[in-house]
Image (spheres, rainbow, N blue to C red):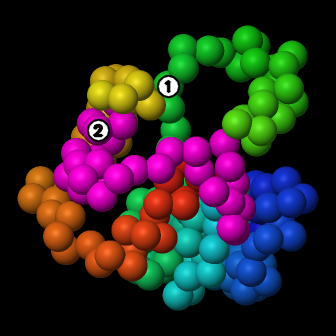
Amino acid sequence: MPGIIYADESLLLDMDSKVYEQVVNVATLPGIIQASFAMPDAHWGYGFPIGGVAAFDAKQGGVVSAGGVGFDISCGVRTLYTGLRADDITPVKEKLADLLFAQVPAGVGSTGRLHLKPKEMDDMLTGGAQWAVQRGYGTAKDLSRIEEQGCMTGANPACVSDHAKKRQQDEMGTL
């Protein structure tokens, strides 16, 4: 089966070469259907690349691998409902993609535009996607399409190290 990576040239150049190797390895697993896929934010994982997607047919010896990527934290790609139909965007899809790449920082070392003070960071960690919706970065309807409504009960920012919070400062709002 083929391996397909959804990314432009600049993202491909920034990807760790181990991602390519893992996409190929997943494509050789028994029972794989169609292809081994990797999303634009793919990075090296434990077996599958994190950001990797594959479907398997159990009748053809396929596997179920909850830990294929390791301990995924649901970072990165989301599908948001827009109400637009394929016919609406087909004529402008290249322009739309260019605009998204221009507006959303992506790739290793990219920096977001949103910088939070420590208290705001803790509020974001506690509030999750609801915090983002309250600030206009999404809609209430988006929350219904995210596991746990985008917020895990009992989230405690004190459990996040200062090092991780500082790293997040630059990466907030990036892919």
Number of numbered discs visible in the structure rendering: 2
Q: Is residue 126 magenta?
A: yes
The type of residue carrying mark 1 is: Tyr
* Distance from Cα at disc 1 to Cα at disc 2: 19 Å
Q: Nearer the viewer, residue 11 or 162?
A: 162
Residue 175: % across, % down: 61, 54
- Residue at 41 percent across and 25 percent down: it is 136
Q: Nearer the viewer, residue 88 or 10?
A: 10
Q: Nearer the viewer, residue 28 or 70?
A: 70
- Residue at 32 percent across and 76 percent down: it is 162
For residue 81, which numbered disc appears in the image? Answer: 1
Is 110 left or right of 152, judged from the image as shown? right
Secondary structure type for disc 2: helix
Residue 46: % across, % down: 52, 87
Q: Would residue 37 be seen by someone viewing this image from the given angle?
A: no
Residue 48: % across, % down: 58, 79
Asked if 95 appears above or below 147 in the picture, the reply is above
Is 56 left or right of 140, judged from the image as shown? right
Q: Earlier in the sequence, mark 1 or mark 2?
A: 1
Could you say which quadrant of the image residue 144 lies in?
top left
Secondary structure type for disc 1: loop
The span picked out in magenta is 104-133
Asked if 15 appears above or below 118 in the picture, the reply is below
Could you say which quadrant of the image residue 132 lies in?
top left
Q: Is residue 111 magenta?
A: yes
